[in-house]
């Protein structure tokens, strides 16, 4: 750490290769330790630690050392500031490495580890709903069509589909004793 605290940032930010090599040698143990500790929470391996540590150095020297130039010794020691930068880079790296996710609908049920126990369909007493209400509920819920599709299929206005759906739900709630919302 003493070598790190003796780093002359003015020389370093001029692009002096010797100064940069000395800085990397002095800062690498700290940066690697912080990155390793941060990435252990995300269960990422050693290869990711090395990649993320390299990202820290790339970020420090990118755009003519713009980030390194923002260091203010009045606010924190260089090692503290580098630890904060390293942690931030490690978190960013872990976010980029997260596994791609699929929408739940695209995941096979077998992969979910959940048995598909079909819920018993609601038995609607005969005559409770009109034929049109029954048909619209079947299209909306059983066939999972949207309002526009049902309207097109039945050659009626979309508002009629919504209205009929609403009236059917009111009848069902009244019959099964549920208060309307």
Image: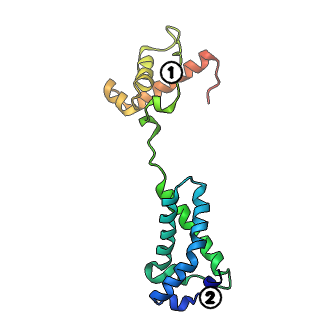
Disc 2 is placed on an element classified as loop
Colouring rule applied to residues: rainbow
Against 16, residue 119 (above or below) is: above
Against 163, residue 96 (above or below) is: below
**Position of residue 32 measured from the top left corner of the image (x, y, whole percent):** 57, 68
Kindly identify which numbered label has been placed on residue 168.
Answer: 1
Disc 1 is placed on an element classified as helix
Neighbour tally class for label 1: few under 14, some 14-19, many 20 plus, Cα within 10 Å: many
Asked whether 65 or 120 is in front, the reply is 65
The answer, for residue 180, to whether it is visible in the render is: yes
Kindly identify which numbered label has been placed on residue 6.
Answer: 2
Residue in the image at 61% along x and 55% along y: 41
**Position of residue 42 measured from the top left corner of the image (x, y, whole percent):** 57, 54
The answer, for residue 13, to whether it is visible in the render is: no
Residue in the image at 59% along x and 21% along y: 173
Asked whether 139 or 2 is in front, the reply is 2
**Position of residue 129 measured from the top left corner of the image (x, y, whole percent):** 49, 14
Residue in the image at 49% along x and 52% along y: 98
Quadrant in which the N terminus appears: bottom right
Residue in the image at 47% along x and 37% along y: 104
Answer left or right for 122 relative to 149.
Answer: right
Instruction: Say if mark 2 contacts mark 1, CB within 8 Å.
Output: no
Asked whether 48 or 102 is in front, the reply is 48
Quadrant in which the C terminus appears: top right
């Amino acid at each position: 750490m003493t070598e790190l605290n003796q780093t002359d940032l003015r020389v370093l930010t001029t692009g002096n290769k010797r100064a940069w090599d000395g800085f990397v040698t002095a800062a690498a143990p700290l940066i690697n330790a912080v990155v390793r500790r941060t990435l252990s929470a995300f269960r990422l391996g050693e290869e990711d630690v090395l990649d993320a540590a390299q990202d820290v150095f790339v970020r420090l020297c990118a755009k003519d050392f713009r980030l390194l130039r923002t260091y203010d010794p009045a606010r924190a020691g260089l090692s503290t500031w580098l630890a904060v930068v390293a942690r931030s880079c490690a978190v960013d790296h872990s976010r980029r490495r997260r596994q791609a996710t699929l929408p739940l609908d695209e995941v096979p049920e077998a992969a979910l580890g959940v048995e598909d126990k079909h819920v018993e369909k609601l038995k609607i007493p005969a005559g409770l709903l009109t034929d049109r209400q029954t048909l619209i509920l079947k299209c909306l819920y059983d066939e999972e069509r949207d309002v526009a599709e049902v309207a097109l299929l039945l050659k009626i206005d979309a508002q009629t589909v919504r209205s009929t759906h609403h009236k059917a739900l009111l009848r069902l709630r009244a019959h099964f004793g549920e208060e309307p919302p």
